[in-house]
Image (spheres, rainbow, N blue to C red):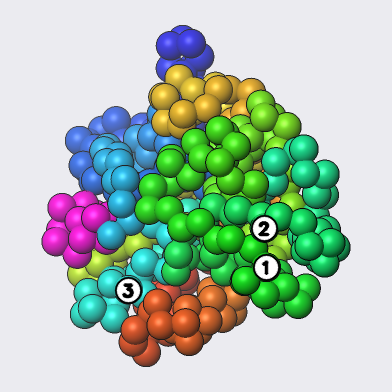
Amino acid sequence: MKRFLVGLACAAALAGGGANAADKPLTKVKAGHLVAIDMAPLFVAKESGCFASQGLDVETLFFANPGDNNAALAGGAIDFSTNPFTLPFFAANSGVPIRVVSAAGGWGVMEVVAQGKLGLKSMDDLKPYVQAKKRKLKIATLQGDTLELILKRDFSRLGISENDVELVYFNDLIAMVEAFRSGQVDMLSHIKPYTTDMVVNKGATVLTTSAKTYSVTTPNTVVSVLEKTLKDRPQVVQAYLKGLICAAEIINKQPEKAAQILTAGNYFRVNEKVLLSSLKSAPAPVSFVPDIAVIQSVVDELTKLGYVKGTVGTSDIFRLDTIKSLEKK
């Protein structure tokens, strides 16, 4: 495994101008993150040598709580933050000069899964289930989050009242998975690869994904920096994004190798088979320009529900010129 990783790192360095990086010390940066499959480009870029080939030494810092990730960026403890796309709006509405420079990488990450024994195949199957007046389905989700909105959008489309089901709100993503795994809840609105794990190992059924409910290029998470970083260190931001693009090429063209890298790095609490299935089931290749219109519609919806307080819009904080230019190349 070590020989494989070293070889891949060398190949990435050669492809990305590694001689340049070798001639001078690497620039150290810190990147805060959670753990979902769309963060695979960050982890693959670090482990494969993609960041090093761009002159960066990236230290990854895990945050269990998105709010702590936001706070670390605001306080200057980290240089880059990979967080759910709603979090930059919370930060900006609180006065933090945050700027979103890219999607994290990966589409269709949010999924709603059901216990296989229920026989549900899609969200449309909920309507006859409810009409049959069977026991209320218990559905695990996060309150005030896109994972909740996925459910509510389909409820609205199907004419299902929230009183027809029992929404069970969690504060801990891992606890949500365990509740589903142990059969305490019937459905789970969560993220890959954990939903994939339930499908592969527990016979769960995928009812919908963020790609179906929103759009294919609606992100789960985005990459953010402070405005000062974007203005004073644009070359570092560009190098970081180039590293992610390099990693995306590995994921898109060699998913088996990407799964090996992620498993070796022990980034996810699932096995290599699940990771590979999660990568291969993506609705589109990894890229980094998100659907701005859908993001704004979600923020508008969260504002109406009272979860987002403020007037900050996508045009105020999204700065995608660099990633758009790099992806064209």
Dot 3 or dot 2, earlier in sequence: 3
Residue ID for mark 3: 90
Proximity of marks 3 and 2: CB atoms separated by less than 8 Å = no
Which amino acid type corresponds to the residue marked 2 in the rendered image?
Lys
Dot 1 or dot 2, earlier in sequence: 2
Residue ID for mark 2: 136
Proximity of marks 1 and 2: CB atoms separated by less than 8 Å = yes
Relative to 27, is 71 above or below? below
Residue toward you, 79 or 142? 142
Identify the magenta region.
Answer: 68-79
Residue in view at x 55 percent, y 61 percent: 167
Residue ID for mark 1: 164
Give the side of residue 121 with respect to residue 167, left or right.
Answer: right
**Neighbours of disc 3 within 10 Å: few (<14), some (14-19), many (20+):** some
- The image shows residue 287 at horizontal and vertical percentages of 59, 54
Residue toward you, 122 or 67? 122
Relative to 26, is 135 above or below? below
Which amino acid type corresponds to the residue marked 3 in the rendered image?
Phe
- The image shows residue 47 at horizontal and vertical percentages of 41, 29
